[in-house]
């Protein structure tokens, strides 16, 4: 950005000496001189006619410029035209450069938006998958709960009946593993009487 502005300033600075050189070349070369005289005479006639039309002055004969004055005016017109064309070219180049940078930035933003859109789509699909898995697990847990809720009263009822029901004579209730071997031997030798 700064280098473009420095280049623009450099070109404008160099254009002024080139403009002065054009003025010098006009005075020395016959071809440039005739071009400048014709250009200056045309500009002078056009300016005079325009002034007469705008100010509503009566039409009169327009006397041509002297050759020295025409050469001077023509050289100035060519030099100013050169400076104007350089300035216009720089403006067009700066406009093109800024629009190119803007287009490049816009493309970069569009690419980033597309990447974000794809990422959002992926994340949405993943969230949907996780929600579906959660629903499936929730449904499975609910089914297990319902199954256990149906079985639990029966199991509790069966266990309570087993505890109340007397054991037949000579059959021992199961012993826990924490009881020593000697205790189990003595208890097994004694019959339980009801």
Image: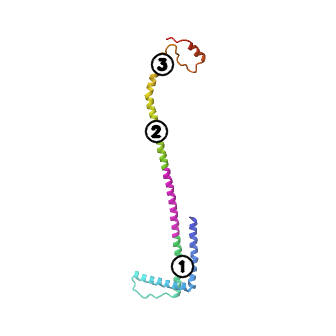
Q: In which quarter of the image is the N terminus?
A: bottom right
**Residue topped by disc 1:** 79
Q: Report the residue at 44% width, 25% height from top.
A: 154
Task: Measure how far apart labels 3 and 1 are at the Cα level.
Answer: 122 Å
Task: Measure how far apart labels 3 and 2 are at the Cα level.
Answer: 39 Å
Q: Report the residue at 43% width, 28% height from top.
A: 150
Helix, strand or loop for disc 1: helix
Q: Please name whichever residue, 124 or 159, is drawn nearer the observer in this view of the structure.
A: 159
Region of the chain picked out in magenta, as a range: 92-120
The spot of residue 160 in percent (x, y) is 46, 21
Majority SS type along the magenta span = helix
The spot of residue 42 in percent (x, y) is 47, 84
Task: Measure how far apart labels 2 and 1 are at the Cα level.
Answer: 85 Å
Q: CB atoms at circles 2 and 1 under 8 Å apart?
A: no
**Residue topped by disc 3:** 163
Mark 2 vs mark 1: in front: 2
* Above/below status of 14 relative to 49: above
Residue 136 - label: 2
Helix, strand or loop for disc 2: helix
Q: Please name whichever residue, 120 or 175, is drawn nearer the observer in this view of the structure.
A: 175
Q: Please name whichever residue, 5 or 116, is drawn nearer the observer in this view of the structure.
A: 116
Residue 105 among magenta residues: yes
- Crowd around label 1: few <14 · some 14–19 · many ≥20 (10 Å): many
> Closer to the N terminus: mark 3 or mark 1?
1
Q: Report the residue at 46% width, 37% height from top.
A: 138
Q: CB atoms at circles 3 and 1 under 8 Å apart?
A: no
Residue 19 figure quarter: bottom right
Q: Report the residue at 54% width, 79% height from top.
A: 79
């Amino acid at each position: 950005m700064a280098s473009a502005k420095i280049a623009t300033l450099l070109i404008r600075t160099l254009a002024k000496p080139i403009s002065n050189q054009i003025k010098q070349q006009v005075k020395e070369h016959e071809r440039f001189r005739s071009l400048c005289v014709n250009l200056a005479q045309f500009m002078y006639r056009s300016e005079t006619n325009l002034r007469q039309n705008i100010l509503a002055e009566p039409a009169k004969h327009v006397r041509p410029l002297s050759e020295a004055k025409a050469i001077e005016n023509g050289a100035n017109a060519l030099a100013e035209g050169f400076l104007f064309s350089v300035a216009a070219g720089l403006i067009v180049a700066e406009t093109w450069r800024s629009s190119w940078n803007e287009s490049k930035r816009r493309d970069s933003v569009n690419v980033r938006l597309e990447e974000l859109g794809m990422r959002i789509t992926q994340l949405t699909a993943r969230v949907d998958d996780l929600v579906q898995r959660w629903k499936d697990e929730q449904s499975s847990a609910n089914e297990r709960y319902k199954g256990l809720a149906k079985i639990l009263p029966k199991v509790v009822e069966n266990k309570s009946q087993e505890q109340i029901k007397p054991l037949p004579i000579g059959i021992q209730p199961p012993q826990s593993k924490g009881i020593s071997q000697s205790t189990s031997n003595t208890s097994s030798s004694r019959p339980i009487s009801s």
